[in-house]
Amino acid sequence: MEYTQLGRAGVKVSRIVLGTMNFGPATDEDEAHRIMDRALELGVNFFDTANVYGHAPNQGWTEQIIGRWLASRPEARDRIVLATKVYQVMGDDPNDRGLSAYHIRAQIEASLRRLQTDRIDLYQFHHVDRTVQWEEIWQAIDVLVGQGKVVYTGSSNFAGWTIARANEQAAKRGGLGLVAEQSIYSLVNRHIELEVIPAAQHYGLGIIPWSPLAGGLLGGVLGQAAESGRRAGPQMAERIEKHRPQLEQYEALAASKGVSPAILGLAWILHQPGVTGPIIGPRTIEQLEDAVAALEVELDDTDLKTLDELFPGPGGAAPEAYAW
């Protein structure tokens, strides 16, 4: 396993992040526990979840599964960097959502109970809340840091200017501010290269890509369809047809390198500037092991150029990408 610092924070995290969104809805508890056990064996020490996972009406289900795993393996808690999130709708009350100090205070206590732990190592704002001032948000976080309930804070799905606003306000208060940004990022979706990655690098945030395989599009869909004879659902079928010429060359490149398309997609992400590590959401132990194998794949300049030509990015950072 490879490790790196989480942005400008001193803590070391694995370059593969264990995403847990499937735990509960798609992966039963016993299998989820086996996946977490195997992740530790492989050296994965960065576990990511969210208070909303399990989804309505089962919000908190995933945190509970992780909490029971931690309770049965008390030695594991100090071996992992545990991340969760706050913002999403957690009930019917008008205050059961967002980033108000009221909601943050209620949700940190609920997450701690479900996770059966005394602290959250990385507490992430799941989305920006444009109705709440950063002074209020940071005041709430300052209290939690002082109580030892939160160690670091991060963002998710933030714009570049929002990262700047958040960290400038934190600096005025003498706080550390955001140390990570969790964002959608893959060969198919490279929008964050314009503004988000430059902002994250400037303010010292580690980039944690979610959906690094574009919802399975980069996971070998053409080969899987040919092998199984099955047809994709309407939405995926539309995406496949849109990208078919690219996917044919992409899957051929993976075959020429002797790796699966999924491993190639993860390897590309791991070669991108500013990336801490991609979130992978395995439903099985085999999917976890495949993801870890991406760390062993070296892509040379020719490989990276080929992938850039197949899936062009925005042309670099703004404004050079479109104005110069």
Image (tube, grey):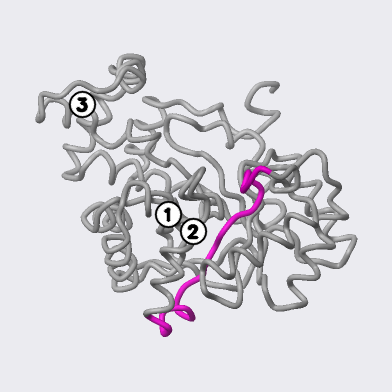
Residue at point 31% right, 52% down?
27
Amino acid, disc 1: Gly
In the rendered structure, are the residues bearing label 3 and label 1 in contact, judged by CB atoms less than 8 Å apart? no
- Please report whichever mark, 2 or 1, sits nearer to the chain's N-terminal start: 1
Could you tell me residue 225's position as x and y percent? 16, 26
Reading the image, the residue beneath label 3 is 222
Amino acid, disc 3: Leu
Q: Secondary structure at mark 3?
A: helix
In the rendered structure, are the residues bearing label 2 and label 3 in contact, judged by CB atoms less than 8 Å apart? no
**In this picture, is 94 found above or below 169?**
above
Check residue 253 for magenta coloring: no
Reading the image, the residue beneath label 1 is 19
Check residue 79 for magenta coloring: yes
Q: Which residues are magenta?
A: 73-92
Nearest the eye: 158 or 27: 27
Residue at point 42% right, 45% down?
269
